[in-house]
Image (cartoon, rainbow, N blue to C red):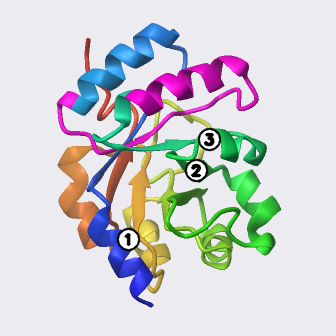
């Protein structure tokens, strides 16, 4: 029961997700700037999860984040052993596939998952993740086809959910107070936290 409280105490209020479509160098320059601006939790987004370019970028990002921020990677679970310092952020598809097998690694390493509704929240609890993102709260440019949950539904979904949650989708630092009122740890975002370089 205390694990969720301990996790919440260790997690920041902002969760940066890196943008897609940037070059290796552009991503590292932006990440370096975001870290300088105080970002402490970073997900290296992986639109093409099995890409060797992503692995190379992950190695460089791991070096940049060392001692400054917790890096969360995405990708096939076969890569877990290659990045021992990184946490892992599961896609909703991975969550559905692996939830019944439990945590893929010990508890001292961060495990997160993307959730979009009640069923995935239950799977996240079953798997023993440390925190989740819940999305999309509002309309977002990244996923324009997705139906927004809205603040009331997001708040309802988090009622009774005992893990830290970051609200994602059309939210930013200005929405922190509202996110806390909804029962969230904070907010996650791409454009909201990515430096304008």
Residue 56 falls within the magenta-colored stretch: yes
- Identify the residue shown where x is 22% and y is 56%: 176
Tell me, yes or no, if residue 48 can be seen here: yes
Where residue 15 sits: x, y (%)? 36, 47
Q: Report which residue position mark 2 lands on.
A: 88
Q: CA distance from mark 3 to mark 1?
A: 20 Å
Query: Image check: 171 left or right of 47?
Result: left
Relative to 124, residue 109 above or below: above
Q: Quadrant of residue 159?
A: bottom left
Which contiguous range is marked in magenta?
A: 36-63
In the figure, is residue 186 to the left or right of 71? left
Residue 194 image point, x, y percent? 32, 27
* Residue 74 numbered mark, or none: 3
User: Which badge, 2 or 1, is on the more N-terminal residue?
Assistant: 1
Q: Position of residue 110 (x, y in %)?
A: 50, 59
Which residue is pictured at 45% across the width and 81% down the height?
162
Residue holding disc 1: 7
């Amino acid at each position: 029961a205390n694990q969720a409280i301990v996790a919440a105490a260790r997690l920041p209020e902002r969760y940066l997700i890196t943008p897609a479509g940037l070059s290796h160098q552009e991503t590292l320059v932006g990440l370096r700037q975001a870290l300088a601006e105080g970002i402490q939790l970073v997900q290296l987004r992986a639109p093409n999860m099995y890409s060797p370019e992503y692995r190379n970028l992950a190695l460089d990002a791991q070096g940049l984040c060392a001692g400054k921020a917790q890096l969360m990677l995405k990708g096939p679970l076969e890569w877990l052993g290659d990045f021992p310092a990184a946490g892992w952020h599961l896609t909703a598809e991975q969550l559905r596939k692996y939830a019944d097998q439990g945590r893929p690694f010990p508890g001292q390493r961060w495990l997160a998952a993307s959730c979009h509704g009640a069923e995935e929240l239950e799977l996240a609890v079953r798997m023993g993740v440390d925190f989740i993102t819940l999305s999309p709260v509002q309309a977002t440019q990244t996923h324009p086809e997705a139906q927004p949950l809205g603040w009331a539904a997001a708040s309802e979904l988090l009622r009774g959910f005992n893990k830290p949650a970051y609200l994602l989708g059309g939210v930013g630092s200005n929405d922190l107070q509202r996110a806390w009122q909804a029962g969230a740890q904070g907010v996650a975002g791409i454009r909201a936290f990515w430096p304008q370089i």
